[in-house]
């Protein structure tokens, strides 16, 4: 029986397989994205909620009073969270979500750093806090995807 989530156990017990760490990591990251997407629609958690726009740099809402959000931005978080939960069902899918999604976030951080935040190019919207968060998320997700699936070193 595999300890990576592959065996045929019938239920919890000492011999039932545990999910691979990469699957747990992907599910956790997915659940956090889902939660963040939901919180983006809750007044109070999202300050300036009355100025929440569908998209664009003019949206005046900020998640936790720090990260600029819009309806589209929140929907992206929800979609990303659902994708993470769905892909966490397999080791390959979990790794794809973490490494591929991390790459997307690195590209999004780069995009946020090169655009003018007050321009039409800022359609999600993004602010400087988002840019730094996306950089950290990208690096963290890629690290999780690679470190939780690397081959063990033989003694």
Image (tube, rainbow, N blue to C red):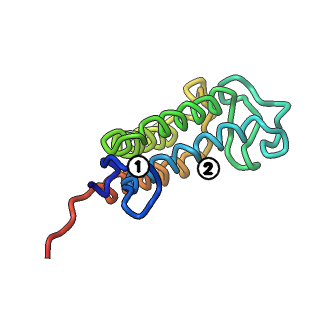
Is tag 2's residue or tag 1's residue first in the polypeptide sequence? 1
Residue at the (48%, 39%) spot, across then down: 84
Query: In what element is the residue under mark 2?
Result: helix
Along the viewing direction, whichever of 34 and 90 lies nearer the viewer: 90
User: Up-down: is 101 above or below 153?
Assistant: above
Residue at the (77%, 30%) spot, across then down: 52
Mark number for residue 122? none
Which residue was labeled with disc 1? 23
Instruction: Using the rendered view, name the quadrant where residue 127 is placed.
Output: top right
Mark number for residue 129? 2
- On screen, residue 108 versus residue 3, left or right, reads right
Along the viewing direction, whichever of 28 and 3 lies nearer the viewer: 3
- On screen, residue 37 versus residue 43, left or right, reads left
Instruction: Using the rendered view, name the quadrant where residue 62 is placed.
Output: top right
* Quadrant location, the C terminus: bottom left
Q: Position of residue 2 (x, y in %)?
A: 27, 55
Along the viewing direction, whichever of 19 and 44 lies nearer the viewer: 19
Q: Residue furthest left?
A: 155
Residue at the (65%, 43%) spot, across then down: 36
Q: CA distance from mark 2 to mark 1?
A: 29 Å
């Amino acid at each position: 029986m595999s300890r990576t989530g592959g065996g045929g156990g019938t239920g919890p017990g000492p011999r039932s397989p545990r999910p691979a760490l990469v699957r747990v990591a992907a599910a956790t990251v997915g659940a956090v994205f889902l939660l963040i997407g939901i919180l983006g629609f809750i007044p109070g958690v999202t300050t300036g909620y009355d100025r929440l726009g569908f998209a664009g740099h003019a949206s005046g809402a900020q998640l936790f009073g720090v990260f600029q959000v819009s309806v589209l931005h929140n929907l992206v978080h929800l979609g990303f969270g659902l994708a993470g939960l769905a892909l966490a069902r397999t080791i390959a899918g979990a790794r794809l979500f973490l490494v591929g999604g991390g790459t997307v976030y690195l590209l999004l951080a780069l995009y946020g750093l090169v655009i003018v935040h007050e321009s039409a190019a800022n359609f999600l919207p993004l602010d400087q806090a988002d840019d730094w968060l996306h950089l950290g998320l990208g690096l963290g997700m890629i690290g999780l995807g690679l470190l939780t699936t690397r081959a063990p070193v033989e003694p």
